[in-house]
Image: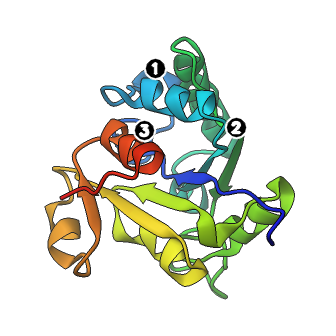
Amino acid sequence: MSDRHPAVFLDRDGTVIHDAHFLADPAGVRLLPGAAEAVARLNRAGVPVILVTNQSGIGRGYFSEADFRAVQARVEALLAAKGGRFDAVYHCPHAPDRQPPCDCRKPGVGLFLRAAEEHRVNPGRSWYVGDRLRDLEPGERLGGRGILVRNPDHPDEEARAPAGTLVVDTLAEAVRVVLGGEEAN
């Protein structure tokens, strides 16, 4: 894997966009402050940005794959308007209670390993950024580093975070850590 490069794996809802809970309407997409600029900064630095998102609303029947794609297209259009882009997007459509369980639903590592293979990424040198501990756990399992983005809707996530977990207020702060080697609180 020495010929593979690091990437930044991002969660979507609560990290890049406001978490609207089972978002099915593109009109409801709202970027979090500074998120597009943060993604663009990674792009300019040549760091692959790979989105990995659980979308259990599909498996629960709340919205369709087509709805997900429409919402995702809106996210990407808003990013592009500010110079940002994802190098790849992966999603798990399964409900959490699916039997047998899938390996693609975070904290599973299936989508991360697929992305690593398809994009020549070294998962052990990569960053894992999200607003839930399940977004960071794949990084722990694969040898990477995680950054938890505080989300007022999920204050228990920070309280449950293992000692030493990097915690920041915004995606922009996480990107500063990734690119600058800064330590977060």
Between the C-alphas of marks 3 and 2, the distance is 20 Å
Which residue is rendered at x = 56% and y = 45% of the image?
Answer: 63
Question: For the residue carrying disc 3, how many other residues have a C-alpha within 10 Å: few (<14), some (14-19), or many (20+)?
Answer: many
Left or right of 156, for residue 78: right
Which residue is rendered at x = 44% and y = 24% of the image?
Answer: 37
Q: Dot 3 corresponds to which residue?
A: 16
In depth, the one of 122 and 57 nearer the eye is 122
* Count of marks overlaid on the render: 3
Left or right of 103, for residue 146: left
Q: Earlier in the sequence, mark 3 or mark 1?
A: 3
Helix, strand or loop for disc 1 = helix
Q: Earlier in the sequence, mark 3 or mark 2?
A: 3
Between the C-alphas of marks 1 and 2, the distance is 15 Å
Amino acid at circle 2: Ala
Which residue is rendered at x = 68% and y = 53% of the image?
Answer: 90
Q: Position of residue 101 (x, y in %)?
A: 62, 84
Q: Earlier in the sequence, mark 1 or mark 2?
A: 1
Q: Dot 1 corresponds to which residue?
A: 27
Helix, strand or loop for disc 2 = helix
In depth, the one of 142 and 101 nearer the eye is 142
Question: For the residue carrying disc 1, how many other residues have a C-alpha within 10 Å: few (<14), some (14-19), or many (20+)?
Answer: few
Relative to 164, is 26 above or below? Answer: above
Q: Please tell me the numbered disc located at residue 66.
A: 2
Q: In terms of image quadrants, where is residue 133?
A: bottom left
